[in-house]
Image: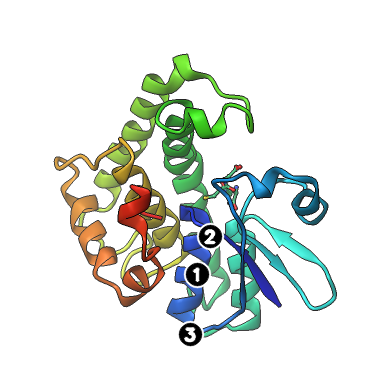
Amino acid sequence: MKLLNSVGPNPRMVRMFMHEKGIEIPLVDHDLLGGENRQSEFLKKNPGGQIPALELENGTILAETVAICEYLEEKHPEPALVGKTPEQRADTRMWTRRVELNITEHLYAGFRYAEGLDLFRDRVYCIPEAAAEIKKKAQGGLEWLDGQMQGREYICGDHITVADLVLYCCMDFVGSVGQPRDPSHKNIEAWFQMMDARASAEATIAPNWEELGMRV
Ligand SMILES: N[C@@H](CCC(=O)N[C@@H](CS)C(=O)NCC(=O)O)C(=O)O
């Protein structure tokens, strides 16, 4: 098994998941900034043209960050980051979906349509005129989540899950490229500081992130 890897918050999220679980999988690095993931050799593996992807022994390619994590959790159930019971797993999936649909997709789109436009305009359909509004939409999602997190340590309550890793890697990245955290979101700020202090956060940040100018 190999992880098709690169700089970027999504591959970092899978590496952070692996670190939390103590899983080691060889990494095959790809030149994302140079666009290797959009060229035919890579597209033959992942027609979605994005990173990360997991290449299994039989040649099967699994893409989509959360799907990869779900697969790894089935292979390595402990410590559980999706959940130990059907109820916990459903709760994690509910929150992960809320985080992706209401927050991280908008934060990423805000980046692609503005600060990341030079990198993305020839890769995906970009709507630069929507950048400011989509960033506001993301902040609305964060405002809502901040209220939901009152009295909770993690997004799903008292235990860390995939939902926390999805949001942390995204917020750490976008915070370094023009979408800073809102200090009035006190619950999210406390949660972010706690996530940021985890060994898995430190272990998965690119050693040259300062040179790159991005928390990836
Ligand atoms: N929905 C995908 C998103 C993956 C994604 O956006 N990956 C970024 C890196 S963080 C990427 O490949 N960007 C380069 C590109 O789209 O060309 C997932 O969850 O894995």
**Furthest residue toward top:** 129
Residue 15 is labelled as: 1
Percent of width and height locating residue 97:
52, 49
Q: Is disc 2 surrounded by few (<14), some (14 to 19) or many (20+) residues within 10 Å?
A: many
Residues marked 2 and 1 touching at CB (< 8 Å): yes
Instruction: Of the two numbered discs 1 and 3 on the same chain, state the one appearing first in sequence.
Output: 1
**Vertical side of 177 occupied by 162: above or below:** below
Instruction: Of the two numbered discs 2 and 3 on the same chain, state the one appearing first in sequence.
Output: 2
Q: Can you identify the residue that label 3 sits on? A: 22
| Position of residue 204 in the picture relative to residue 72 (left or right) | left
**Cα distance, mark 2 to mark 3?**
16 Å
Q: Is disc 3 surrounded by few (<14), some (14 to 19) or many (20+) residues within 10 Å?
A: few
Residue placed most toward the observer, 111 or 168: 111
Q: Is disc 1 surrounded by few (<14), some (14 to 19) or many (20+) residues within 10 Å?
A: many
Percent of width and height locating residue 49:
70, 46
| Position of residue 34 in the picture relative to residue 115 (left or right) | right
Inspect the image, locate mark 3, and give the three-letter code of the amino acid beneath it: Gly
Inspect the image, locate mark 2, and give the three-letter code of the amino acid beneath it: Pro
Percent of width and height locating residue 65:
58, 58
Tag 3, which secondary structure?
Answer: loop
Name the residue at 55% across, 32% down.
120
**The residue at label 2 has a CB less than 8 Å from ligand 1:** yes
Name the residue at 47% across, 26% down.
113
**Cα distance, mark 2 to mark 1?**
6 Å
Inspect the image, locate mark 1, and give the three-letter code of the amino acid beneath it: Arg
Rendered-image quadrant of the N terminus: bottom right
Tag 2, which secondary structure?
Answer: helix
Name the residue at 48% across, 85% down.
22
Residue 11 is labelled as: 2
Tag 1, which secondary structure?
Answer: helix
